[in-house]
Amino acid sequence: HGDSTACRTWATGCVVERGLRQMSLPDSGYATAGNANYAVGKPDAPLVVSLGDGGSATLTFNGEIFDGPGFDFAVFENGFGSGEFAFLELAFVEVSSDGLNFLRFPSVSEQQTERLLAAFSEGDAALFDNLAGKYVAMYGTPFDLADLPDTALLDKSAISHVRIIDVVGSI
């Protein structure tokens, strides 16, 4: 939960690159709800920033995130509902130690792909791994830097940027 003492630091900066309101309708315009400052600091459920289809938010931190035992950081999204099923706002997560080279967490979705779900359909968090937003607002999705492959382009002991990229809800 966003009030948990397990959360010791919060993003101090955010740059948003908005996507279209609906990817399949290029004339739909770009998402406009909220502003980047809403993604800074502790989560506040009524204050959200919409990324739009495929949009992204790159967050920066005063302190560095590092690979320790267990989960290393959490991403808070703006899903809603209660119980086992809820409307989920899914996003890919990437990290960087230099702000230039980003590495994406390998993610898994076991959601059916036979038919497109209706807008605001409920999703089951158990079907997703390493995707932000698998829980409703105020509950973060935890990530473990150990899930990323070792590479010279990423220093897992000094993560300075976390990028969230909207998963487009289209088949």
Image: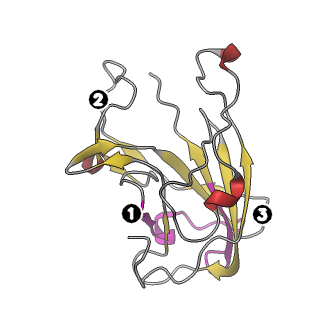
Q: Is residue 7 above or below residue 154?
A: below
| Residue 142 part of the magenta segment | yes
Looking at the rendering, the stretch of residues picked out in magenta corresponds to 138-163
Residue at left 38%, top 43%? Answer: 88
Q: In the image, 44: left or right of 83?
A: right
| Residue 121: quarter of image | top left
| Residue 85 part of the magenta segment | no
Indicate the position of residue 47 as horizontal and vertical percent values: 56, 55
Q: Amino acid at mark 2?
A: Gln
Whether the residues at callouts 2 and 3 have beta carbons within 8 Å, the answer is no
Say which label, 1 or 2, has the lower sequence index: 2
Q: Is residue 139 above or below residue 108?
A: below
Task: Determine whether the residue tagged by mark 3 lies in a helix, strand or loop.
Answer: loop
Task: Determine whether the residue tagged by mark 2 lies in a helix, strand or loop.
Answer: loop
Residue at left 38%, top 70%? Answer: 1
Q: Is residue 118 above or below residue 54?
A: above
Instruction: Indicate which disc residue 112 carries.
Output: 2
The residue to which callout 1 is attached is 139
Indicate the position of residue 128 as horizontal and vertical percent values: 34, 48
The residue to which callout 3 is attached is 99
Task: Determine whether the residue tagged by mark 1 lies in a helix, strand or loop.
Answer: loop
